Amino acid sequence: MTPMSQKRLLLVGATGMVGGYALRYALQNTTVGSVTAIVRRKLGISHPKLQEVLHRDFADCSSLSQVLSGQDAAVFCLGAYTGAVSDAELRRITVGYTIEFARVLHGSSPNAAFSFLSGSGADPTGRSRIPFARYKGEAENALTGAGFPSVYIFRPAYIYPVEPRKEPNFSYRLLRAIYPAFQLLFPNQVIRGDDLARAMVDVAVQGTDRGGKVFENREIRAMVKRIHLPAE
C-alpha cells in the first residue's frame, strides 16, 4: 500500500469502548495512512500515524474546520448510555453533537465517507416511545441528508466488551455475566466490540458492494465473517 493510496481517517469517540477498538485497529491497518482522533480528554498513547486533537465542546465544532479538511473518512462513535445522563443531555449528545460535527466535516471534507454508531431499534420515523431509539433515528436522518456521498449506519444490538470494564448499569452487568449462554441462544443479538469497530473502519475506508448502507446486527456479523474476522 503506497502512501498516496492510503486513507486519512477521522475518529470521534476514541476514549469509548468501540472507539478505542477502532483506534487500535486503524493504527494497525495498512489501508489507513493517518488517524486524527477528536477527543475530549487525552488518549495517553502515541503513534506515528496518530494526531490527537483536544476538543471539549462538541456543541460547536467550528474551530475544527481546518483539522477536518482533506479527510477521506470518518468513524463517529461518540454517545452516551441511557440512564447515565438526563433525557435532554442524551438528545444533545446523540443528535446535537452528531449534526454539528457532520456540518463542519461536510464543509471541510465534502467527499468523506461516514460510519456512524447507531443502535438496534433506532427509529427514523420518530414514533418510538423509547428516547434512545428516537434520538438515534433523528441523528441517522440528519446524516443521510447531510450531503456525504456515503453514510454507513451501524445498528448493533448488545455490544460485548471483550476486555473487562466497569459496566455502566445493571443491565450491562447482567448481560456480561450471562453472555456465553446469551450468545449461544441469540447469536444475532450480540456483537463483539472489537469486531464492530473493525467493520466500521473497514467500510469507511474501503466502501462496500452491498446495496444498502444500514447494517443491523445480523448484517454486521455477516460482514465480520466475510472479511475473515473472528465473529465469536
Image (cartoon, rainbow, N blue to C red):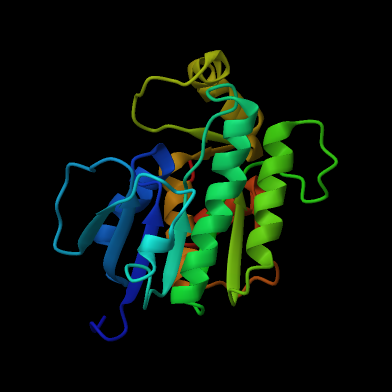
Percent x, y for residue 210? 64, 70
Residue 231 higher or lower than 152, as above or below: above
Residue in view at x 45 percent, y 58 percent: 75
Q: Nearer the viewer, residue 143 or 34?
A: 143
Percent x, y for residue 51? 22, 60
Residue 123 higher or lower than 89, as above or below: below
Residue 77 higher or lower than 166, as above or below: below
Q: Nearer the viewer, residue 172 or 131?
A: 131
Residue in view at x 44 percent, y 64 percent: 74
Quadrant of the frame with the N terminus: bottom left
Occupied quadrant, residue 135: top right
Camera sees residue 229 = no
Q: Of all residues shown, which one is farthest toward the right?
A: 127
Camera sees residue 136 = yes
Q: Nearer the viewer, residue 179 or 109?
A: 109
Query: Horizontally, is 83 left or right of 72 in the view?
Result: right
Residue in view at x 71 percent, y 39 percent: 133
Q: How many marks?
A: 0
Percent x, y for residue 143? 63, 62
Percent x, y for residue 185? 65, 27
